[in-house]
Image: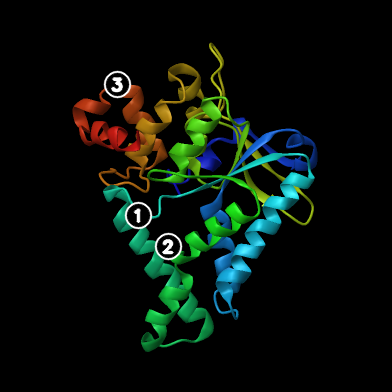
Amino acid sequence: MGITKLLPELSEFTSTDVDLSVVLKAKRVVVDASVWLHQFLFYFATATNHEEVIVARVVRRARRLIELGAFVIVVLDSIDTVMPAKAITIEERRIRRAEAYARATGGEDSSKQTTVSQYHVTDKLVRHLITRLHRDGFTYVVAPFEADHQMVHLVKGGHADYVLTVDSDVASHGVPIVSHTDWSTLRGTVVHVQTGEGRHSQSRVADAVHQHGTEILHTLGALVGCDYGGEIGVGWAKALDILAAGDVHDKYPNVLQHQHQRR
């Protein structure tokens, strides 16, 4: 999700094999519910009463964070509103998941419609989760559009300390994220993009951040490619060359439109 292949470019800002039982203790943790829903949907799409199973798994995982001493805020994507620039991407992902599942299970074309419905996070599933969160007394927020902007707002507004997500869009805003969590060992990866005036790095991306601030990742994201429409898709090396030349907006005016969509 988010900016294409961004997280590998952020190695300077990344800590691996982090003990989450220590890092998240007494912290306010925002959970990207969409990530967990898709993860559990992958495993339980064909289970009997799969919606109930998936919701129960999400709640169980959230409770595990609470047991660590974290205060959990579950954030969900808007149910009724999808950003127009993201609608095509969502549909393409849905079809790819369906086709991959059909291949893995030996399904034929005639079974794909059923597979699509099983592998798509439906409004019904999200509403089921909201009902359960409300019933069990969890703190949750339904974002007006996509969850990533809401999660960033919660951290930057001083309402949370970390975001649990694999969405690189969130990391690009300079808020600390916990990704690729091993729930059997409670160890994970923490990414926190921070500027350091005058610092130099072996990474050109890190150098760009230190020189221009985290906002430069949005410009690079528009050049490299991302979930949103209008991206150019030149790759990281070329994007950094364009940035160094100082003529991004003259040669690629769509970058301005892209940045507006991200906000």
Tell me the distance, in whole angstroms, between the alpha carbons under discs 2 and 1. Answer: 8 Å
Residue situated in front as seen by the camera: 70 or 191: 70
Secondary element type, mark 3: loop
Query: What kind of residue is marked 1?
Result: Asp
Label 1 Cα crowd, 10 Å radius (few <14 / some 14-19 / many 20+) = few
The local secondary structure at tag 1 comes to loop
Real-space Cα separation, disc 3 to disc 1, in angstroms: 40 Å
User: Could one spot residue 59 in this view of the protein?
Assistant: yes
Name the amino acid, label 2: Asp
| Mark 3–mark 2 CB contact (< 8 Å) | no
Q: Nearer the viewer, residue 24 or 15?
A: 24
For mark 1, what is the residue? 80
Q: Are marks 2 and 1 in contact (CB under 8 Å)?
A: yes
Instruction: Tell me the mark number nearer the camera, choosing from 3 and 1.
Output: 1
Q: Quadrant of residue 28?
A: top right
The spot of residue 234 in percent (x, y) is 32, 42
Q: Which residue is mark 3?
A: 246
Viewer-side label of 3, 2: 2
Question: Judging from the image, what secondary structure is the residue with disc 2 in?
Answer: helix
The answer to which of marks 2 and 1 sits earlier in the sequence is: 1
> Seen in the image, is 3 located left or right of residue 233?
right
